[in-house]
Amino acid sequence: MIPVITIDGPSGSGKGTIAQMLALELDWNILDSGALYRTLAYFMKENAIDIENFKENQDFLKKRFHVSFDPGIPGEPVRVLFENKDITAIVRTEEMAKITSNLAAEPIIREFIKPCQRDFMTAPGLIADGRDMGTVIFSDAKYKIFLTASAEERAKRRQTQLKRQGLEVNMRSLLQELEDRDRKDTEREHSPLIPAVDSVVIDTSNLNPEGVVKVIKTYL
Ligand code: C5P
């Protein structure tokens, strides 16, 4: 059985950074499921496919939807590769996050993405980052982590991240968007964002990434 470590939590809780650090250290594969949803949203937009005509275009999408991830360099976001292009900067915007969150609430979309996610489970192991990795997609995983942090701290982190990408954002609207998206992700009917009952919950508000990794290593 391929070992899987699931890392779930709201945006800005540190999932991406921690998943990247663990993937680089263990030399395991990485699945950024949020980026997978973002890429699908981008691809649908590019091909004028929406939720209404999704079903009739499903075969076309299935044939072409092959995404891969490169853990990249520490401190920079995990890179998203699609159709021989690095689309990291295109999909990691707040605008794309909002579109993605609406799309991700649709059961037909979640069913479509499910097998794509399971395909990432290859040797020597997988770090799976998302919202429902431990509860739904890899409910059989041996190690499950759920990261949290205060909304203010998460908005601050997101702002730093976006700044690094050259994007200026207003702190107040960022906090509002983050809280709206959290609410939508937590209250949705299908695969809501909740910690798996067998997960270890870590509040990262007052920890740096190295501190979080230390807690996780103790758990592992
Ligand atoms: O993690 P990230 O911010 O990139 O995720 C974007 C959106 O994708 C989330 O707000 C959520 O709505 C959706 N998502 C999801 N299930 C996952 C990962 C992301 O519904 N496993």
Image (cartoon, rainbow, N blue to C red):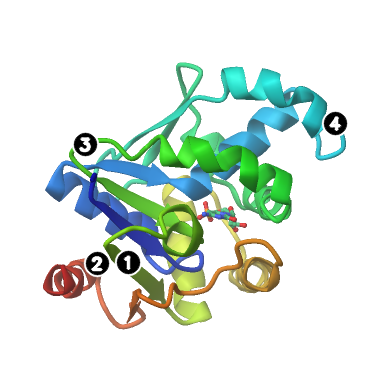
Determine if the C-beta at disc 2 is less than 8 A from ligand 1.
no
For disc 1, the marked residue is 144
Type of amino acid at the residue the image marks with label 2: Pro
Q: Is residue 2 found left or right of 169 in the rendered image?
A: left
**What's the mark number on residue 209?**
2
Can residue 147 be seen here? The reply is yes
Residue 111: x and y in percent read: 63, 44
Residue at the image position 52 percent from the left and 73 percent from the top: 194
Residue 135 position in % (x across, y down): 47, 64
What amino acid type should be assigned to the residue bearing mark 4? Asn
Amino acid type at mark 3? Ala
Work out which quarter of the rendered image holds the N terminus and state it.
top left
Q: Earlier in the sequence, mark 1 or mark 3?
A: 3
Query: From mark 3 to mark 2, how far is it between C-alphas?
Result: 26 Å
Q: Label 2: how many residues lie within 10 Å, few (<14), some (14-19) or many (20+)? A: some
Q: Nearer the viewer, residue 64 or 56?
A: 56
